[in-house]
Image (tube, grey):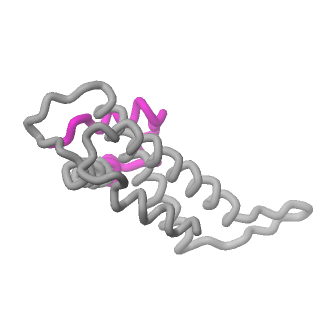
Amino acid sequence: MTFVTELDVRRQGGLNDFSAIPPERLRQCLNDAHAEILAETTLTDASPIDVRVIRAESKLALANLIGSLSLAEAASAQDVSLPGVRVDEHAGADSRRVWAERLREEAWSMLRPYLRTRQPKSLHAVREAQS
């Protein structure tokens, strides 16, 4: 059981279009975020949860969602040319990747009091990818 609901994540991320972001995809990203939190912190499903944990789980779920959408887009990415206009889809994917990384860093910062180690594995992986 996650600390927040799918609707909480939709509200925080402004994800009102259910057809653009299917509930199943968002629930999976939320479940993954919850599993990360349980693995990297001293929190359990029975822990009393404060607002920082709720916001952090929402941010991690949004970061996971943005990452999954960017990966799906990258798999089919192509530059589009129109008369007088060139759209580089890689630039959009890069900005989403940066946004997802920022959300992830904000979330783990909020969870710092509960961390088992100084730096969660998933945040360490993001920083290694940046190098």
Q: Which residue is nearer to you in this view: 21 or 113?
A: 113
Measured as percent of width and height from the top left, residue 61 is found at 36, 47
Locate residue 75, reporting x and y percent. Answer: 52, 74
Residue 98 appears left or right of 29: right
Q: Position of residue 7 (x, y in %)?
A: 32, 33
Q: Is residue 99 left or right of residue 39?
A: right
- The residue at the point 48 percent across, 53 percent down is 66
Decide: is 3 above or below 118: above
Which of the pair 32/109 is nearer the observer? Answer: 109
- Residue 70 in the image: x percent, y percent? 52, 61
Q: Is residue 12 magenta?
A: yes
Q: Quadrant of the C terminus?
A: bottom right
> Which quarter of the figure has residue 74?
bottom right
Q: Residue furthest front?
A: 118
Q: In this view, which residue lies farthest toward the left?
A: 46
User: Foreground residue, 24 or 74?
Assistant: 74
Give the quarter of the image for residue 81.
Answer: bottom right
Residue 121 sits in which quadrant? bottom left
Location of residue 7 with respect to 130 vertically, above or below = above
Q: Residue at x 42, y 48 (%)?
A: 21
Q: Residue furthest right?
A: 84
Q: Which residues are magenta?
A: 1-26
Left or right: where 97 falls relative to 37: right
> Does 8 appear in magenta?
yes
Q: Residue at 30% of width from left, 50% of height from top?
A: 33
Which residue extends farthest top? 51
Q: Is residue 94 above or below residue 77?
A: above
How many numbered badges does the structure rendering display? 0
Residue at the image position 74 percent from the left and 68 percent from the top: 80
Question: Where's the N terminus, which quadrant?
Answer: top left
